[in-house]
Amino acid sequence: MRAVVVGGGLAGITAALALRESGADVALFEARPRLGGATCSFQRGDLIVDNGQHVFLRCCTAYRGLLDRLGVAGDVRIQQRFDVTVLAPDGRRGRLRRAALPGPLHLLPALARYELLPPADRLRAVRAALALQRVDTGRDGERLGDWLAGRGQRDWARRALWELFIVAALNIGVDDAVLGSAAMVCQTALLGRHDAADIGMPDVPLGELHGEAAARLIGTVHLKSKVEAIEPGPEGLVVVVDGSRVAADVVIVAVPHEVAAGLVPEQAVPGRERWRGLGASPIVNVHVVYDRTVMELPFAAAVDSPVQWIFDRTRVGGLDRGQYLASSVSAADRWIDTPTEQIRAAFVPALERLFPAARQARITDFFVTRERRATFRQTPGSGALRPAAATRLPGLFLAGAWTDTGWPDTMEGAVRSGLNAARLARSSLARTPAGGDAGGGPVR
């Protein structure tokens, strides 16, 4: 049972682990020098830097299962109760903290007391949240912004409430986000089980949490190995890697959609070029190291500021003095090509308005990391472009958060895609010796 996994992100890691646990001989090929994909770390002097701040929720059961598989579940922490402090540049603060009530009632008291919204907007927000619970998550052709406008959600309510979670979850502005995916996020995380939205964060660098742990368990991992083609072979499939040919019974392609479109044979997915229509949405991360503590919270959200979410990375980054803050900016089209000095000119004063103690602090380091193609662009019509895991070529399957997982492009979606592809691959391997069809079923 020879299995090849192409791509060493979370989808590929998950698929490789699942296949290896089922007894397959697995080889994973990754073009980069490390595993982890979009969740990786690097060294900057004495500082350990994650390429971006990634969080998960208690409802991310597949991702948490992967952490268990990797043996690193003890290296993350989850809030005892969903609790987010929201800062405004004028010094006002809001707090969204769930109550000890069953869902969806657990967040209604927080909305009713949310200080950053006038009372009338709070009431309208409660009504809109309850209405969103009834929206079909398959509605792929409508914009969330239009739906919110039809429910009386004014501009300030969008900025001070809806953008906090939708932009971070879907990596696109509220006005342009696809309604179905936004409804899925809210129904699953915010309006589902009372503890579903409790926020989890790693206590170690992402490279250690995912990549290093996976490398120890997968077995045969080839880094800096670029897969150039996948072809039908006389007895299965052939993967062309840096000029060499590797035979396989099953292959799981777990790379970004634009890369997959160039690897997957046309006969496997006719019209695969349409995947390019998924586009890309960027994320920019702004990293600031101060010579003293300026933020007392472990993390916070911000409104009416270029800062969206800000995290204290001091301990995880290995800093023994001062404070290391990282601001994660989703839907960052405005910033992705902006020079670092201009970003600094905008973000340093913004942080000082949010955290007055920063005005007396000295910045010892400032840098920016950019993820130009962090996620696909989750706009109306994108759902119809997401393919199923199965292809028409026997033994060939797709994985990645961009495939049709039922989840947005998130870590949870990536892990679910890897599990799904591995399940189909195992079924294919089980049928092949008996001479049955090793194909994967219908193709979208």
Image (cartoon, rainbow, N blue to C red):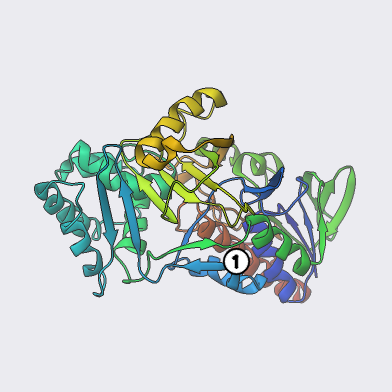
Q: Position of residue 299 (x, y in %)?
A: 43, 53
**Residue at the spot of label 1:** 419
Is 113 left, or right, of 348 in this rendering? left
Quick check: can you spot residue 389?
yes
Q: Residue at x 81, y 67 (%)?
A: 219
Name the residue type under label 1. Answer: Leu
Splitting the image into 4 quarters, where does residue 262 fall? top right
Return the residue found at the far front. 360
Mark 1 closeness class: few <14, some 14–19, many ≥20 residues within 10 Å? many
Q: Position of residue 375 (x, y in %)?
A: 52, 43
Return the residue found at the far left. 120
Q: Quadrant of the N terminus?
A: bottom right
Splitting the image into 4 quarters, where does residue 357 fall? top left
Q: As rendered, which of 414 and 239 lies closer to the eye?
A: 414
Q: Position of residue 417 (x, y in %)?
A: 57, 60
Q: Residue at x 68, y 55 (%)?
A: 207
Is 378 left, or right, of 399 in this rendering? left
Q: Secondary structure at mark 1?
A: helix
Q: Is residue 49 above or below residue 371?
A: below
Q: Is residue 78 above or below residue 207?
A: below
Is 113 left, or right, of 84 in this rendering? left
